[in-house]
Image: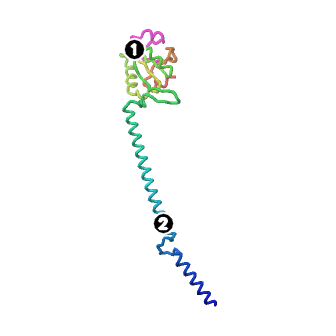
Amino acid sequence: MTKTFSGLMGLALLLVLAGAGCGLPGQDTPNNDTSVMQQDEAMMQEKDDSVMKETGDSMMKDESDAMKQDDAMKQDGVMKDESMMKEAEGVMMRKGTYEDYSADKLDLANDGKVVLFFKANWCPTCKAVDADIVSHLGDIPYNTTILKVDYDTATDLKKKYGVTYQHTFVQVDAQGNQITKWSGSPSLSDVVKNVK
């Protein structure tokens, strides 16, 4: 009886294994979990690769479109040259300038600094400083204006500020009141150091 029972058990086991497909190595049946998992992983990898490529292509296209829009706005004059305007802490800043004196330009001191440079065309020191300022215009600080005043013709201004010789610098407020005065600056960088 034990032989019959053992035989029946063996037969039953054999039928269960054969009927279930048991997923033995080397079998390519739909019930083989390893094979199905490998197929799923391959499909997911292909999908991930496709999504990554589409995302990368889309990002590159968006960046390219943004650059084109930026260029178009610059060409249309919508964007101002960075050296001309800069926004900092909510205050509009303008590029520093070096220009001829005019009384209405004193208003620039309302939101910046204005320096009068009393210079004479015959003065070698004035010429040297003038040349240094012109060659370093980009180094004039934002919201700073240096105004060239003709020493030989600006008698009233010389009197007002007590200027007795050329190569004198006077920083003024918007009403034309003197803030500080000095002379002898050999370069733009030295002029800038003296501005308050």
The answer to which of 125 and 136 lies nearer the viewer is 136
* Location of mark 2 (residue): 38
* Location of mark 1 (residue): 150
The answer to which of 32 and 75 lies nearer the viewer is 32
- The kind of secondary structure element at disc 1 is strand
Q: Is residue 23 left or right of residue 129?
A: right
Q: Which residues are magenta?
A: 152-169
Name which residue lies at 53% across and 75% down: 20
Q: Earlier in the sequence, mark 1 or mark 2?
A: 2
Rendering coords of residue 70 (x, y %): 40, 36
Name which residue lies at 36% across and 32% down: 75
Name which residue lies at 46% across and 9% down: 159
Of discs 1 and 2, which sits in the foreground? 2
Residue 172 vertical placement versus 141 (above, below) = above
Res 188 quadrant in image: top left
Q: Is residue 136 left or right of residue 5?
A: left
The answer to which of 93 and 77 lies nearer the viewer is 77
- The kind of secondary structure element at disc 2 is helix
Name which residue lies at 50% across and 19% down: 110
The answer to which of 148 and 127 lies nearer the viewer is 148
Task: Residue type at mark 2: give it.
Answer: Gln
Q: How is the image coloured?
A: rainbow
Residue 157 vertical placement versus 36 (above, below) = above
Rendering coords of residue 149 (x, y %): 41, 15
Was residue 86 drawn as part of the magenta stretch in this picture?
no
Task: Residue type at mark 1: give it.
Answer: Asp
